[in-house]
Image (cartoon, rainbow, N blue to C red):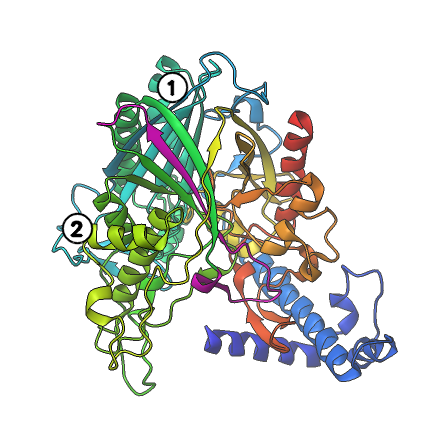
Amino acid sequence: MKKTFKVIIALVLCCCIIMPTAAFAQEDETTYSSVEEYVAQAQTDEGTDSSLKTKIVLAKFLNKLSNFVINGILGTALNLIIPDSAAVADFEDFDLNKYENFYAGMDKFIDEPQGEKVWSLGYGKASVLPADFGSKKYAKGAYIPYIFGNSMYTDEDGQEEDLMVRAVVMNDGSGRGNVVFIALDAMGFANADVRKIREGLKDIAKQYNIVSINVSCTHIHTGIDSQGVWTDPIGCIINNIISPNVRYGVERSFINSVVNGSKKAVEDALADMTTGELYYSKINVNDYVWDRTAPIAYDPFLYKLEFQPSNPNTAPTIIATYGCHPESASYDWASADPEKSVSFDKKFSPDFIWHAEKVINSAGYNFIFLQGNVSTVTSSRGLTGDGVDEFPGNAHYTAVRYGYEIGYILLGMNMNEEERIALNEATGDRLGVAEYSGKEEYPRYTVWYEGLETVEAQEVKPVLNIKLKQFTVRIDNNIIALLGKTSVADNFVLKDNWGRYYTVSEVGYLEFGDNMKVYMSPGETFGELFLGGSGAEGFELEPIREYTGEDIIVMDLMNDAAGYVANPANYVLAGLQYNENSGEFDSDTWCLISYGKGAAPTFIGNFYDIYDSVR
């Protein structure tokens, strides 16, 4: 990534020599006749170190320039040269109200329990590995295209890991219908494919009065390519240029296995439905996550909903959410030795999700993880998370131990230390407390429960409110538009008479009692749009918590895979962001994977429309 960034910056700097600066100031109110005039503006701002201010202004200038080069020149040229696939629809003829398989949720929100006044929940899960996995190789949805494999990692119990879909069906006894939450072990799933899952469930939805079906991705970077760009993008584009028979980037066998697996998981969850009580907890896990890109803004809490069934013979269920990229297992291709050549790891893994579930299952619980405000936040526990040098240094093993620890925290956050010790022993001491704790040869080993805060579990009154809104959003990132218009990605793409591209997406608002209020986001929302701070300056809308006045949380990658959702004022395809914490400039290329500058105001503006309609 660093080499790529340097190449891009070199290109940008070369363009500085041959292109007039004023051409790239088109989005500012002020224009400048030269680079010198643009940078000199920094010297006039009182109260700011002139050298630092100069660097900040120069970085912003380079960001605008790179946006223009990559999106305005390169992206536009590619979209003009490369024709649309036959799947692209006409924007002017499109009727959103007739676009099938959208579930709007509930028209009426309630504040107090109604009807039977009791929670019901059912749980189910299924594999989404295609039937021919093992004999046929699939592309790994990660960082480099054309990496194919046909084997899964084996966990510490000797069990072959699996890619799963997990589902919970819930209702609050009010008679307003059942709500489905599905979590898929994949990088992301386009809204068009989410609707395929709903299509497979439509008869069941009618039979069981399901009013909302929501698909979240765990966002693993070591699963089967679910977005098309890693399988065969070149072959896909060529086929769709010369043939009216559209070839999609995502393997149809994988899509079919996800649709069938989701149906089975929901059917099992419906059969498992039982009444019980729901409890809410949250705990600060700041030591387990970090935001890698400025401006730094992230939610450090791990949230848990725990369903305790009335029937003691039925397993309880933990629904967990926090913002964290599950990519610990993604780096086995990297090497600390620059002279050593390392091949890309071709094995698949559900990353830490599988191993957190192992711990939770061993305590008798079901488990589902719904991705939180993922932004640019990733896991933080060092190479192995405990400083024991004898442990294998590979990235997959890091995911194993990280998953164990998150599983233990979820189980033990409401316990005292004595109860945690008993839990640790009863579940097999998977992190080796007995073997490594207190030994002189392992001075950096950390015990998961020592110093861990004990938090109170709050009972959640049986009130479940959910409402969603669908809309079209312009894809003003021409690189992503290219992937959509050529059907490399599975987005449903529309084109207007001016040659602009759009897709359909959704946002939602969700409430569990008075305890958990959720913005359901289709992308990876930058934390400043949610929490506020300096990174929100210049955004046309208030940050989410400020607007709602609520301790609201975010669940990202829900019902779409819209990429990064950034403040337009800081939007950059390849450039620099000033890090106030370190006093340095961080490279930033995240918005190369985004619908574009207009995504944030479109998504959050539509969310505020929902919020205002019910609150």
Q: Position of residue 204 (x, y in %)?
A: 33, 19
For marks 2 and 1 on the same chain, the one whose residue lies earlier in the sequence: 2
Q: Which residue is drawn at 46% across and 57% down?
A: 285
Q: Residue at x 21, y 77 (%)?
A: 390
The residue indicated by pointer 1 is 205
The picture quadrant where one finds residue 168 is top left
Apparent side of residue 605 relative to residue 345 in the rendered image (left or right): right
Circle 2/circle 1 CB separation < 8 Å: no
Q: Position of residue 188 (x, y in %)?
A: 41, 47
The range drawn in magenta is: 286-313
> Which quadrant is the N terminus positioned in?
bottom left
Counting every numbered tag in the picture gives 2
Q: Which residue is drawn at 58% across and 77% down?
A: 9
Q: Is residue 312 magenta?
A: yes
Q: Which of marks 2 and 1 is in front?
A: 1
Relative to 5, say whether 509 is above or below. Answer: above
| The label number, if any, that marks residue 136 in the structure image | 2
The picture quadrant where one finds residue 395 is bottom left
Q: Front-most of 146 and 600?
A: 600
Q: Which residue is drawn at 27% across and 84% down?
A: 340
Residue 432 can be seen in this image: no
Q: Residues within 10 Å of mark 2 (few under 14, many from 20)?
A: few
Outermost residue toward the bottom? 339
Relative to 129, say whether 575 is above or below. Answer: below
